Amino acid sequence: MSFDYLLLTRALLPEIALVLGALAVLGYDLIAGRQRPAEERLKASLAIGAIALIAALVDTVLVGTMDSVYGASLMLDTLAVAARCGVLGLALITFGIAAGARVPRHPAEYVAIILFATTGFTLMAAANHLLVAFAALELASLSLYILTGYDKSRPESAEAALKYFLYGGMASAFLLFGFSLIFGLTGELEFGAIAIMLAHTGMSPLLAIALVMVLVAFGFKAAAAPFHLWAPDAYEGAPTPSAALIASASKLAGFTLFLRLLWPGLGSVAGGETGTGIGWLAPVALIAGASMLLGNVAALAQSNVRRLLAYSAIAHAGAMLLGVIAAEVTGPGPLLYYAATYGVAAAGAFGVIAVIEANGGCQKLTDLIGLGRRSPLLAGCLAVFILSLAGIPPLAGFFGKFAVFAGAFRSGGLAAPAGWLALLAIALSAVAFYYYLIVLKQALVVTPTAEPKRIRVPAVTGLTLLVATALLLLLGAFPSLVLRYFA
């Protein structure tokens, strides 16, 4: 088999831009930044990193779609291009958040690791090969472990990183063992070739074990119940920009890879409505239901705003799994729209938290009291982000849920498991609305006992939050801007 290395280089232009950007950040800091204050080093690093992200975004658009690259190891279809643009945009939002957050101890290294994590995300979006998928996932995961424990001055950060790393290492072992069993059964590594082999061989006990291992690993990566135990600690202990990246770009890239593996690669052994016997549909449905139930109920008991967002993320992961189940009928559009708009809202909420933390502290829900007086800009943006997470029209979060739930009903009606899961998700949305309203009550309604101190919002972070707010309003008013590309 011959390979076109020029075509491979063209396909990997976004990743090349990101890696060169990370090296440029480290090189500039080593040569010219060591003697400067940490704030200046952070600004310079973020500026260089933002240029790299914009270059990668332009490369993604210019390269466009390709049927297959390097022996079908990469697939630059519409899903890959859209997901790449999404994770690059969410990484840009993360940089904007970092500009207003507490300055990390080694700012250039911090920015470079975010770029390496984003490189892993973009590769995950295009991966069509078991080894490429595992390598991309590990590049992203190792970067996120470091970013989680980057604040060495806080014991919570070290604890969160340790838990994240231990759970992540075990999940990687499960994933690699599952991939090895799939390769042993089919003799293939590329998703399309695996699908062809499984269409002839069907389900077997060994394949069932492989599927369980793969689902366990991806359940961890998606923070889905019962593999979610790392998430509340990571969201609470990680530096705020790191938590924003984990909650947004990480989820979008992970679900893109998960969707590509399950339907094009393993669709013939889905089971349920699409095949005979038990396949991966049933356990994914159970994980989705457990995630939505546990995430929403546990969020009710939280007094820490970060842990509340973590359990909210678990509930949203369950809804996104519902989009994975329905993707055979609806295509990837509803899931991608949901994951992208959720990422913007979650990252924006962490951006508000970052600015408040830089001006004092923001751990408890009570720390939000008086936000409307302290900073009307932050309060207004937070209201949009929280209401979008709750799924209130006309914001993008509502249409994301609507598209996924409607797709679930289309895939089999009320009698199908997906239909029952959609009904459960709709019922639990009322529960979610309650705890989201608690956040807004603290920020906008509760009167502070003393005159609150005004919050200074850095220009870059304020602009980032406004852009994120505008995106949620725009995509809510015109959801077809994303969905039409998958029609």
Image (cartoon, helix red, strand yellow):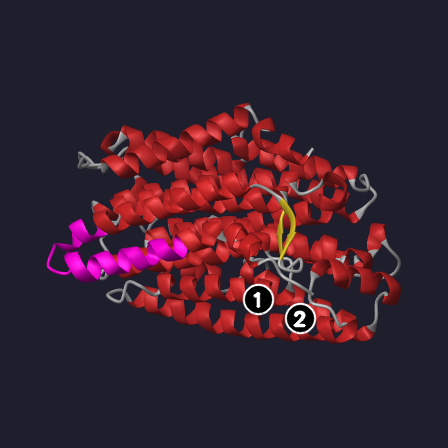
Give the residue type that dot 1 points to. Answer: Phe
Q: What is the x, y in percent for residue 329? A: 77, 41
Give the distance between the C-alpha atoms of the residues marked 2 and 1, in whole angstroms: 9 Å
Residue at image mark 1? 134
**Residue at horizontal 42%, vertical 28%?**
470
Give the residue type that dot 2 points to. Answer: Phe
Q: Is residue 304 left or right of residue 133?
A: left
Q: What is the x, y in percent for residue 103? A: 22, 53
Q: Total of numbered circles in the picture?
A: 2
Circle on res. 179: 2
**Residue at horizontal 46%, vertical 50%?**
14
> Foreground: 377 or 255?
255
Q: Which residues are magenta?
A: 18-42
Per the image, label 1 sits on a secondary structure element best described as helix
Q: Vertical placement of 88 versus 474: above or below?
A: below
Q: Specify the principal SS of the magenta part.
A: helix
